[in-house]
Image (cartoon, grey):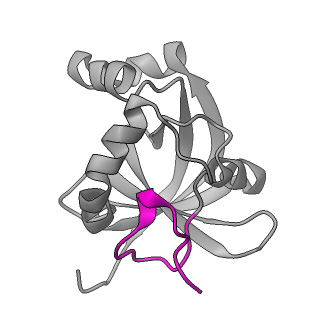
Amino acid sequence: MGIRSHPEHRGDMTSPSTTTPATTPSSRSWRVARLTAPLARRVAGRRFFPLWAVVHHRGRRSGQDLSVPVAVRASGEGLLIVLPWGPTTNWVRNVLAAGSCTVSWRGVEHRCVDPQILDRPAARPFFGPATWFVVRRLLGAQAFLQLRRTGSGVERRSAR
């Protein structure tokens, strides 16, 4: 098993597989992702870095366990994930089809259920003015994935 050779996911990853679109987007959000990807891969899901998390899910067709680093925001009892490439990426479709996933965030594994796609107006209340500016202008996100956390989460015991 190897990491797919997508530009966003080159380098060391904690997972053997990841899902991303096969084509390279040309938007501003893609350029930002390319610049931040090396750092995101190293810190996603760690205890003291709450901006990025890792979504663990199962492929709808392959049945493989997959993961992808994402930008995440707490939203009450749930998590809100910015989708700069929209809700049709494979990993989002996998989570929607399964109805659940696990998110490694702040050093804890969170079991999440009830995935829902939100549009900009529905997601706006979860962001302050500065973060909304980044989401809207820099990332150009039109869609967001809202997940509901179940239980209190399980602390990861890894040597990071």
Q: Position of residue 27 (x, y in %)?
A: 45, 31
Q: Residue 67, relative to residue 51: is it above or below? A: below
Where does the C terminus fall, quadrant-wise? bottom left
Magenta part, dominant SS = loop
Q: Residue 116, relative to residue 49: is it above or below? A: above
Relative side of 94 to 74, left or right: right
Q: Position of residue 57 (x, y in %)?
A: 61, 64
Where does the N terminus fall, quadrant-wise? bottom right
Q: Residue at x 47, y 22 (%)?
A: 123
The part of the chain drawn in magenta is 1-18
Q: Nearer the viewer, residue 83 or 152?
A: 83
Q: State how many labels appear.
A: 0
Q: Residue 142, relative to residue 62: is it above or below? A: above
Residue 42 visible, this angle: yes
Q: Residue at x 51, y 62 (%)?
A: 6
Residue 73 visible, this angle: no
Q: Position of residue 35 (x, y in %)?
A: 27, 48
Q: Nearer the viewer, residue 16 or 131?
A: 16
Extreme residue in the right direction: 61
Extreme residue in the top direction: 121
Q: Residue at x 40, y 18 (%)?
A: 125
Q: Is residue 135 magenta?
A: no
Q: Quadrant of residue 143?
A: top right
Q: Position of residue 32 (x, y in %)?
A: 32, 39
Relative side of 113 to 77, left or right: right
Relative side of 90 to 37, left or right: right
Q: Is residue 9 magenta?
A: yes
